[in-house]
Image (cartoon, rainbow, N blue to C red):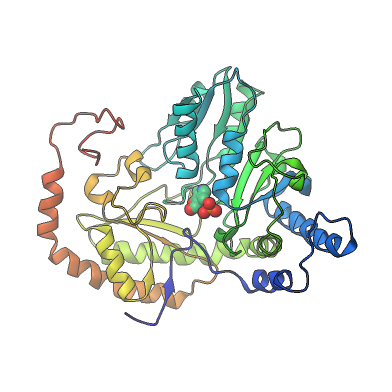
Amino acid sequence: MTEKIIYLDNNATTKTCDEAIESMMPFFGEKYGNPSSMHDFGGQVGRYLKKAREQVGGLIGAADPNEVIFTSCGTESSNMALRGLTDPRKKHIITTKVEHPCVLNVAKHLEKNHGYEVAYLGVNAEGELDLGEFKDSIRDDTALISIMWANNETGVVFPVEKLAEIAKDKNPDVLFFVDAVQAAGKIPLDVKNTKIDMLSISGHKIHAPKGVGAIYIRKGTLITPFMLGGHQERGKRGGTENVAGIVALGAAAEQAQNFLPDEETRVRKMRDRLEKGILSRIFNARINGSRLNRTPNTANISFEYIEGELILLHLSDLGICASSGSACTSGNLEPSHVLRAMGVPFTAVHGSIRFSLSRYTTDEEIDYVLEKLPDVINRLNSISPFQRELLELKEVKNPVKNPKCGVDVKRCCER
Ligand code: PLP
């Protein structure tokens, strides 16, 4: 084990930036007032919340900072959007097969326990949606459409502004929610100039601490509060606010906005160099996800016939932090639902590694990975005939669809 840490797992979580840490410290000490108190000691704290609301509103382009509601994380924000539906006559929801579990599992829960019918839209080999299929799926009784802005595993960006337009043209009453947890701070967001009704972000993905997030709810959008309690957050989310976390989120949001040009140029260049370097040095590497529509920081690469977990362990010994599939599913060996939906072959899904960069990533770190990774893969390739056999044994020659997931069983792991 080495002391050196090359952190390329920024889609799992990010380093808290100095500005966020500095901004939050007074709220663990002298500024302990309750922002809802009538006295000025609490009122002062309330003014910091107001500033944070403006900073977060600035990052996502909200017309009014009061459209920003603070939550505990991205997962809570998604729950709020999906569980807050108010019209009992509308029981149809549209989402995609590649959403984060914080959307997919809520959708499944609503389906199983609350009588909703959910359409899960598929993606093509590049991880992209079919706009025609999307339009056709919208019905008069569609209550909500939930589509992520950027995918956490592949970085593939969905054209959510366009999708919201299509949706509202066909059914003006439908609610359009966007999980923007992996888009915020990576690509420009300007929600006021879109037809998006709700949008979620998470602090720990944009260099704020864990335990804080936000949901944008456009003025006039009807949503039943999910967390009932006091009148905090304009009655939309009860509970005394996590002031320190929120102030830090505000500071991090401002920094994220300042660093957007850096993401687009320097970070993208490093990511592209990493991908090109890997493809030119390693014969059994392939990139997963659209080459054109991806966040600048994410590279999802498969090394065919090698177990991703083995690669991760070897990289970890060299101090390189990456991920196989999404962080929420690592720890179990379930293959990525995102790569499966894209039809990535079974032998490549299992060998997929996600490298996700940030503004703290350096060129030297990319050089280090490019120097070390080929040796790791070559070593694993040399023991891989055994692995290959194991994986091929699992391949089924007959192209029958798995009734559970509808995927060609040759490419599917649920066997
Ligand atoms: N949405 C996406 C796309 C994510 O990647 C994640 C976390 O990985 C979440 C939502 C959940 O965010 P949080 O960890 O703040 O609950």
Please name whichever residue, 22 or 121, is drawn nearer the observer in this view of the structure: 22
Q: Quadrant of the C terminus?
A: top left
Please name whichever residue, 284 or 409, is drawn nearer the observer in this view of the structure: 409
Name the residue furthest front. 229
Decide if residue 79 is on the left or right side of residue 397.
right
Q: Quadrant of residue 3?
A: bottom left
Q: Quadrant of the N terminus?
A: bottom left
Q: Name which residue lies at 64% across and 62% down.
A: 256
Q: Name which residue lies at 75% across and 48% down.
A: 232
Please name whichever residue, 210 or 17, is drawn nearer the observer in this view of the structure: 210
Does the rendering let one see residue 162? no
Instruction: Say how many tags the image has.
Output: 0
Does the rendering let one see residue 108? yes
- Picture coordinates of residue 188, whole percent (x, y): 63, 52
- Picture coordinates of residue 208, whole percent (x, y): 61, 64
Q: Quadrant of residue 321?
A: bottom left
- Picture coordinates of residue 295, whole percent (x, y): 50, 54
Q: Name which residue lies at 70% across and 45% down.
A: 238
- Picture coordinates of residue 302, whole percent (x, y): 29, 55
